[in-house]
Amino acid sequence: MSVGIPCEQARLWLAENKPQQLTTEQQQNLALHLQGCATCAEEAAAFGELQNLLAREQSPSPLARARFLAALQQQASMQQQPINAGIAGFLRALWPTRPAWSMGYSAALLVLGLVVGQLLPPRTFGVGPQMSEERLIHLCAVPPKPPEVL
């Protein structure tokens, strides 16, 4: 049962969770509505419980705080390490540490690709010497012009 204001408005005010920002008249209308509407009163109680749960402050344990600060310090020290500058540093970053393995792996993949390419049957996609004469005539035929309308 709705009293004073509609349930939708009361729920909106409750969900915004800022009753202190409501005008005095709005606060009175909300209180009057909650007295007369059991459904909205239950929602207000649920919102109140949720607010209380969120208000409890859980402090981290001293061990967790120490681990966090150590990880933060480690991250900060990693960011302060000098970066290899210049072209030499850039080339070192691009060149693999073991180029022989990389080149051997690349050569093996190239040979494998060539062998597989030779073993697969050729694909003509319907165009080539084995195409039937009828198909070739059909592909090369010029479509007739539509008749002109006078």
Image (cartoon, rainbow, N blue to C red):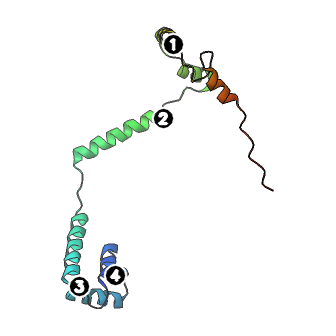
Residue under label 3: 34
Marked residue nearer the N-terminal end (3 or 2)? 3
Q: Secondary structure at mark 1?
A: helix
Q: Secondary structure at mark 2?
A: helix
Query: What residue is shown at x 50% (from left), y 14% (from top)?
Result: 121
Residue type (three-letter) at the residue carrying disc 2: Gln
Q: Nearer the viewer, residue 52 or 63?
A: 52
Q: CA distance from mark 3 to mark 1?
A: 78 Å
Residue type (three-letter) at the residue carrying disc 3: Leu
Residue type (three-letter) at the residue carrying disc 1: Gly
Report crowding for label 2: few under 14, some 14 to 19, many 20 or more residues within 10 A (C-alpha): few
Residue 47 place in picture, x, y as percent: 24, 72
Residue under label 1: 117
Residue 133 place in picture, x, y as percent: 64, 21
Residue 54's quadrant in the figure?
bottom left
Residue under label 2: 80
Q: Secondary structure at mark 4?
A: helix
Residue 118 place in picture, x, y as percent: 51, 9
Q: Does the CB distance between marks 3 and 1 fall below 8 Å?
A: no
